[in-house]
Image: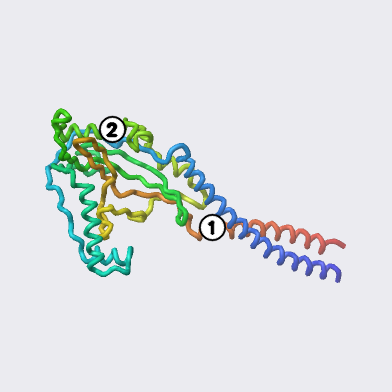
Amino acid sequence: MKKKIFIAACFICYIAASVAIYYAVDNHIDKKVVRLHNAAIANLRSFFEDKPMYVDLLYGPYGCDYTEVPIPSPQEPTYNDVQFYIRLIDSTLTYSEATNIVRQNMKDKWEKQYGNYRKLYELDIAPSEEDKYGRSGWALKIINIHRGEFLNDYIETFLVYPKQVAYKKIAPLLYGGVPSVETAIQEAFDFTTKNEKSNLQFYYEKGSTYNLISKMESVVNNEYFHLIEDPENTHFYSSLDDFFGYKHPSSFEYGGMHNGYYEVVYYRTQPITYSIERVEDDVVQADKYRLAAIYIGLLTLIMLVIVIFIVKKK
């Protein structure tokens, strides 16, 4: 009789212990997910501890074709421009009042960008990492990190290249003549990569981006988190020029280099971005089941040994 009571007690303890093991394993894996996520973020950020970006030479500088183009005229605001301003900035304005404000904003922006130009040349440059032929001008490859507050950190890689050369209205004779477009492109490259006044010069290093994403993947990837390329346009940018128009160009302005008599305008490509993503829930859940099965299996084995020992004991 005592043996039956003892076996029943063992069975109850076995059920209770199995339930406890299941929830303990569940809690352990959940904590492991958090720990590995934090580790992946920390390992990714470690690449940018000493500098916020990597700037590398993709190619160039080479010669390039170019065409003189008309200097754009100031634009008139469209109905959508005005409505967007009213909704976003000041809903108390009448349509006429908002139109005048948007028109003045566009005029001020045009004056700042084009008002001092006398000639404008468009460069026949559209760089791509995949296109290994027909390259012209120069292109820099940039990789940096965006540290998330509400979203996860992500890495972006994009190209910066010269797109326009604009000559200013100031008398060129004061500077001993006007350089050619080719010279302006070369001087812009030298300024960007060698001059301390350039925002990119400090981070410029040939070969610094070579296999950098692969190196990040090898350090970041773990059981539950991988650094993967985002779907196209996950982190999409639009130029300031298109703020009112909801347009999404494939490239847009990215500063430039200028002196007293000419300006080289840089563009940047839309970024390719990489984010830390968790593996499928099925993988995490399978780990919970596997670990729970191991511990419950060990518990079952121990319980069987105990029961057999009690049953056989005289």
Which mark, by number, is residue 12?
Answer: none
Sequence-first disc among 1 and 2 = 2
Left/right placement of residue 132 relative to residue 53 reads left
Dividing the picture into quadrants, the one containing residue 120 is top left
Residue 169 in picture, x, y percent from top left: 15, 40
| Residue 209 falls left or right of residue 184 | right
Q: Which mark is residue 191?
A: 2
> Which residue in the structure is indicated by mark 1?
284
Is there any visible trace of residue 309 in the rendered image? yes
Q: Amino acid at mark 2?
A: Phe
Quadrant, the N terminus:
bottom right
How much space separates mark 1 and mark 2, taking CA atoms?
51 Å
Contact? badges 1 and 2 (CB < 8 Å):
no
Figure quadrant of the C terminus: bottom right
Between label 1 and label 2, give the one nearer the viewer: 2
User: 296 or 20, which lies in front?
Assistant: 20
Residue 148 drawn at (x, y percent):
45, 52
Q: Secondary structure at mark 1?
A: helix
